[in-house]
Image (spheres, rainbow, N blue to C red):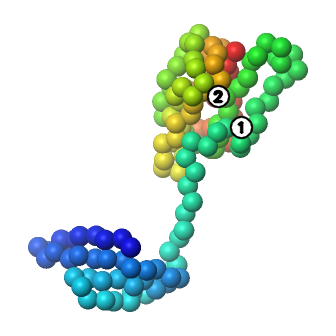
Amino acid sequence: MNSFKYTINGNVYKVVINRIEDTIAEVEVNGTAYKVEMNKPAKKQIVTINRPAQTTVPPVVKPQQANTGISALRSPLPGVVLDIFCKAGDSIKKGQKVMILEAMKMENVINAEKDGVVKEIKVNKGDSVLEGAELIIIE
């Protein structure tokens, strides 16, 4: 049950949404019950925030890199790079915030997956990236 307070032309309306089923919403406005028909069904949306990149796209480690411990931090979803919090040569810890990625009008924090040193940053602020794109190379 959601409750809202609206002021329209100086009049205060307390609106309580009791239930929405398909195209019918059962609401109360200042204590009076109404059934409101909507043009289309209400959309149900499931949002996952800060899902680990490995569950979406496993990092690719080339055979010659396996012994050196070099890995790529990859984009968990398509989006735009809003901010980068490290630079090449920085030491980082697992779980440290290294980047903000905007996707579907939400800011997603990208955290380091392991301890290491940033070898290379493959993107810049404002870049659009696809799911699975290499963002940072960690050694």
**Residue 113 has which mark?**
2
From the image, which quarter does the C terminus lie in?
A: top right
Q: Furthest residue to the top?
A: 89
The structure residue drawn at horizontal position 63% and vertical position 19%, both measured from the top left corner, is 115
Along the viewing direction, whichever of 43 and 20 lies nearer the viewer: 20
44 lies left or right of 12: right
Along the viewing direction, whichever of 93 and 121 lies nearer the viewer: 93
How many other residues sit within 10 Å of disc 2, few (<14), some (14-19) or many (≥20)? many
Q: Which amino acid, mark 2?
A: Glu
Find numbered disc 1 in the image and state the secondary structure of the residue it sits on: helix
From the image, which quarter does the N terminus lie in?
A: bottom left
Q: CA distance from mark 2 to mark 1?
A: 9 Å
- Where residue 3 appears, x then y in whole percent? 31, 71
Q: Are marks 2 and 1 in contact (CB under 8 Å)?
A: yes
- The answer to whether one can see residue 63 in this image is yes
- Where residue 75 appears, x then y in whole percent? 64, 37
- Where residue 128 appears, x then y in whole percent? 59, 38
Q: What residue does disc 1 label?
A: 54
